[in-house]
Amino acid sequence: MDTETVLALLPQLRRYARALTGSQMRGDTYVRLCLETILEEPARMRSSATKLELFRVFHDGWRAINRQPQDECPPALAAIRRVEHGLAELPSVERQLLLLTCLEGFSLTEAAGIVGLDVGDAQTVLSKAQQAVRLETSVPIMIIEDEPLIAMDLARIVGEMGHVVCATAARQTQAIELARSKKPSLILADIQLSGDESGIVAVRDILKSVDVPVIFVTGYPERLLTGEDIEPAFVMTKPFDPEALKMFISQALAVLPPPLDRTKDVA
């Protein structure tokens, strides 16, 4: 096993795990268990330490752990399951295939191998997942972005998904005020606004009074993914693929669904 290669791939695996679970804590717990498995059973890495092999071992562990009864889970996972009781279930294989192909760039054949399906079944499952994204209930989405052209592009993508942009803010104070009054179901935020203003600071203030999932769309992901503080579950790097962003929006709403009163009267 090439330890250096595995370590180099960890940021990608952590990004995927956060998006899959909707939480840094939950995602990192699964990543840690994956690494412990590799250390204890290095033969699980069937070939060289490639991204494909690492993700396959991660999913092998994912499936094994989630088949275990609660009282047989590792302590860290048992604690997470107690926290998750009554919340969104862990993502289905449909969501896994969407993330693997759209976010991580695996081919359908590679993604099928990772989740343990044959290619034909994976194609059917992925097609159903893509159709489900198109049929999602419309919700209000807020955009925090100081570049007008990028804000317009984000609004176009939101509209194509059937959602509604309830507010657009280019300044920190404006974003905070609009979020409190409009109560969006999701926020798309840049981290660097005009001058010295910060989308990160705006979002932190918003989350004190509004419980809402946030996707950071930024050209500076390293400012968020430092490993030194709580990291967001959803970070999309600019320039972004519109289809990947649509999948991210769908995933954020799936693992952190909005209250029912935010899915009505958005037109």
Image: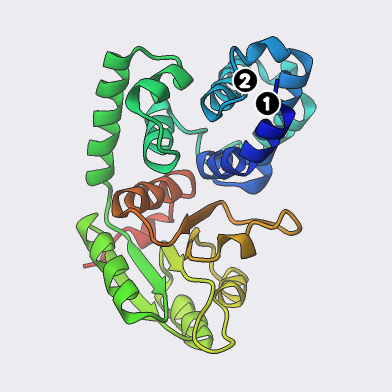
For badge 2, the amino acid type reads: Gly
Q: Is residue 171 above or below residue 233?
A: below
Dot 1 or dot 2, earlier in sequence: 1
Q: Is residue 61 visible?
A: yes
User: Splitting the image into 4 quarters, where does residue 153 fall?
Assistant: bottom left
Residue labelled with disc 1: 34
**Residue at (49, 49) in percent of width and height:** 256
Label 2: element kind = helix
User: Splitting the image into 4 quarters, where does residue 210 fall?
Assistant: bottom right
How many residues crowd around disc 1 within 10 Å: few (fewer than 14), some, or many (20 or more)?
many
Q: Between residue 209 and residue 120, name the one nearer to us.
A: 120
Q: Position of residue 139 (x, y in %)?
A: 32, 60
**Residue at (50, 81) in percent of width and height:** 193
Q: Is residue 92 above or below residue 17?
A: above
Q: Quadrant of the C terminus?
A: bottom left
Q: Is residue 254 above or below residue 228?
A: above
Label 1: element kind = helix
Q: Between residue 4 and residue 219, name the one nearer to us.
A: 4
Q: Is residue 261 above or below residue 129?
A: below
Q: Position of residue 137 (x, y in %)?
A: 27, 51
Q: Quadrant of the N terminus?
A: top right
Residue labelled with disc 2: 61
193 lies left or right of 267 = right
137 lies left or right of 74 = left
Q: Position of residue 141 (x, y in %)?
A: 36, 66
6 lies left or right of 180 = right
215 lies left or right of 206 = left
**Residue at (30, 49) in percent of width and height:** 243
Residues at discs 1 and 2 in contact (Cβ within 8 Å): yes
For badge 1, the amino acid type reads: Cys
